[in-house]
Amino acid sequence: MTTLPVQTNVVEQFLRMDRIPHIWCPGCGIGTSVNSFARALIDAKIDVKNLAIVSGIGCTGRVAGYVNLDSFHTTHGRALPFATGLKLANPKLNVVVYSGDGDLFAIGGNHLIHAARRNVDLKVICVNNLIYAMTGGQTAPTTPREVVTSTNPHGTYDSSFNLPYLVEAAGAVYVARWTTFHVRQMARTMQEMFRKRGFCFLEVISPCPTLYQRRNKMGDGLDTMIFYKEHSKVRNGAPTSEVSLSKAGEIIVGKFVDRERADYRDLMHERFYETLGDRYVEREACECEI
Amino acid sequence: MHADPAGVLTGSHFLDGDHACCEGALAAGARFSAGYPITPSTEVVERFAQRIPTVGGTFIQMEDELAASIAIQGAVWGGAKAFTVTSGPGFSLMMEHIGLAAMTETPCVFVNVQRGGPSTGLPTLPAQADMMQVRWGSHGDYEIIALCPNSPQECFDLTVKAFNLAEQYRCPVFVMLDEVVGHMTEKVVIPPPKQIEVTPRRYTTVPPDQFKAYEPKEDLVPDMPHTGQGYNVHVTGLTHDERGYPNMKPVAQDKLVRRLMDKIVRNADDICLFEESDVTDSDCVVVSYGITSRIAQRAIEMAREKGVKVGKFRLITAWPFPEKKMKEVAARTDSIVVAEINLGQMVREVERAVAGKVPVRFVGHAGGSVHNPEDILKAIMEVA
Amino acid sequence: MAKGSVQIVVERCKACGFCVEFCPTRVLALSSAFNAKGYHPPYMVHPEKCSGCDLCGMYCPDFAIFGFKYPAEETENKDAPQVAAPAPRASEVQDAR
C-alpha cells in the first residue's frame, strides 16, 4: 500500500487560516461563495498580488477579514466609493467589492448607482440573503413581501428591489445572478468578471438560516439549497425586468447582461487628450513619491 | 524630501485662500482628490480639477461627501496623497469617515472652509464654529490635528504642513479655513520645489512575511504597507490587534485607542504651532486664530495706543490644543481675551488650560461677519 | 474502486449537510460522533464510490472538507492508498479544548 503525501485544500492559500473557523452560521451560503471565489482566482490564474478586496459592514462584509489578500473592511455602505478611490489611484489593482444586499443597496444604494453609472472598473459580488443578517434579521430593500423580519414582525408589505434590473439601468456592463447552489457557475462567472473591464455585478442568492429561513419556517440552510436547486431556472440573457424575486417563487439565474462600454478611466483619458493634447500628463497611478 | 516640481507653481501670485490651499496640496504631492461642491469651499477642488490633468493625477467629483471622504482613503491605500474639501453641512456628513481614518491610521487631509451654521446657515459668510466639531465630531476616542491659516499665504503653507503631519502621524489632518480667508485675495509666494519640505509616506522596508500592519515604531506610529505588493494587509475599522485583525477584547481596545491618542498627544510639542508676541508682563493677552487674528491685531494696536500692555497669542495649531503653552502664557499676563467667530468654542479650551489663574473674557458672535475691532478693544479695556 | 477520496477537518465542520446532499455518488453521511462544538461531522459511508470530484469541497461553506483524485496508477490497485495526516492548526487545536 502506498502512502500519498498530505493533501491540501486548494482554497486555503487564499484564506487567513489563522482566523478560521469563521463566524458564519451553519448553512450560511457566504462561505460557499468565498469557496467559489477562491476557485475562480485559481482558474483565472490571477496575479493575486494585484487583487484587492473591499467589503462593507454586515455578514458578507466580513469576507474581507477572511481572505488572504490586500483587504479593506470599510464603513457601512461605502465600500464602493473606497474602491473607486483605490482603483483610480492604482489602476493596476484588480479591485473586487464583496458585500451584502443591505450594505450595497440600502445605505450604499446611492454609491452603487453612481459607480455603475461611471462604469468604474470594479467587480462587485453581492451576496443577497434578503435580510440584514449581522444585526439580527431586519428588513432589507431586497426582502420579498410577506416575509417576517424583526422590523416587520407582522410580515413585510412594501416592494423590494430587483437588483439585476437596478444595476443594469444604472449602467453596469456585466450583470449575472446565481444562487449558492450553483457553485461551478458562480466560479465561472467570477472568472469572467475578473477579465472584463468595467462595472461588473454578480448577485449571489444565499440562505440566512438563522434569521430569514428560521423566522419564516422555511427550514435550514440545506433545505434552502434544495429549494434553490428545484426552483431556479437558468435563463441567460433574460431581460432583467423579469427576474424579480418573491418569497417562494421561481429564481431566475444566469448571465443577464454582458455589454461593452468605455470605463471611467478610458473616458477620462479620451477627454483630456482631446482637450489638452500633449499637455495631458497621463500617469499609470497617482502614487506619491517615496 | 523636496516637493515634486510637477505640482509646484513657483512664483509670486495673487490668489485667494481657496486657490492657495489647492496649490499647497499640489505642492505637497497630492495627486488625488475627491470632492462634492459646497460653498465656500468649492473653488479648492475646482482649481484642482483644472490643474491636475497637466500635473498628473485624478480628481473625481463624488455623489456626496460621504463618498468623497472615503474615496480619498481608498486612494491613500492605493498609494496616493489625497484630500477632500468641504464646509459645515458636508463636514457633518464626513464624520463617520474621519473616525475611520483615525482608526485605520490613514494619512489624509480634510479642508473645511467654515461658514455660518448650524445646518444650512449662512452659505456665503464666515464663522469659526466647527472648531469643537473637528475635534469631537466622530464617535469614540481619537485625536486629530487641526491647523488654522489666517491668510492666503498661510493657506498654502499650512496645507503643505497638513500633508506632512498626516504622513508623519498617520492620522487625518484638518485645515480649518473660514469663508473670509478662503475668499480673500492676497499675494502668495510659492517657493521653488527645493525649498518646500515634503514628508514622504512612511512605507515599511520589512518584507511581507515579517510585517505586522499595526506594529508601532518608537514614535507610536506604525509604518505603512504597500498595497499590491504581496503584503496581504487587512485594514478594518473594527478594533484590531497589531496584525490588523479584529480583536473584540477590552484589553485590545485599550491598547489600540490609547496609542491612537498618545501618538498625537505625546508629540504635541512638535505639532503645536502658534504665534506669540509681547506676552511677558502684559496686562492682557488676546487669543485668536484664523481671520479673527487679523482683526485682533488691529484691536491690540488700538489698546496699546491707549497705554494698555497687550500681548498676542495666535493659535496656528488649534488641535491638539497647546495646553502647556497656554498655561505658560497665563502665567505671564494678568488677563486673557479670546476672540472667535462663534458663541464659545476654543475659549473653553483656553479656560480649561488657564484653570482660573487669570480672568478669561470671551468676545464672540454667531457668525456672518468678522469682528469689529472695537468689540475686541472693549473687552480688553474691561478686563485688563 | 475509488478514484479518489476526501479529507475532512472534523473540528471545522458545522454539519450543514451540503456535502452529504450534493455528493453525486452519495459517499457521505453525517456521523453520530461529535466534534468539540457539538456538531456531527460527515464521514465516508461509501468510500469506494468516491471519484475525488471535489464537489463536496466546492460546496462546503466552512472549508472543512475537500476531495482529491488518486494518481491514475493507484486506481488499479485493490487497496486504497493511505494519505498522510495533516498537522492540526494551532487555532483549531485551541478550539477543540
Image: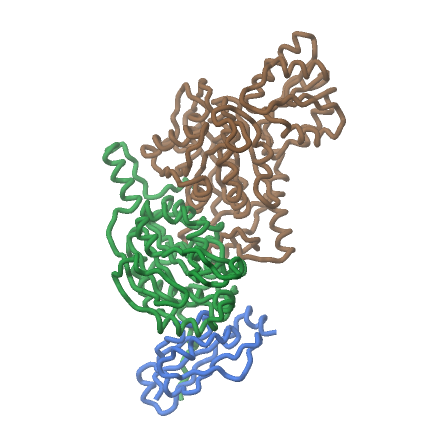
Chain colours: A green, B brown, C blue
Q: Nearer the viewer, residue A200 or A159?
A: A159
* Quarter that holds the N terminus of chain C: bottom left
Q: Quadrant of residue A227?
A: bottom left
* Quarter that holds the C terminus of chain C: bottom right
Q: What residue is rendered at 46% in x and 34% in y?
A: B85
Q: Nearer the viewer, residue A33 or B194?
A: A33
Q: What residue is rendered at 58% in x and 71% in y?
A: C95
Task: Report if residue A99 is visible in the image.
Answer: no
Q: Position of residue C31 (x, y in %)?
A: 50, 83
* In the depicted structure, whether residue B273 falls above or below residue A169: above
As drawn, is B208 to the left or to the right of B147? left
Q: Position of residue A69 (x, y in %)?
A: 43, 58
Q: Residue furthest bottom?
A: C78
Q: Position of residue B34 (x, y in %)?
A: 41, 38
Q: Quadrant of residue B231?
A: bottom left
Q: What residue is rendered at 42% in x and 33% in y?
A: B37
As drawn, is B94 to the left or to the right of B328? left
* In the depicted structure, whether residue B375 falls above or below residue B326: above
Task: Report if residue A26 is visible in the image.
Answer: yes
As drawn, is B35 to the left or to the right of B352? left
Q: Residue furthest right?
A: B357
Q: What residue is rendered at 28% in x and 59% in y?
A: A256
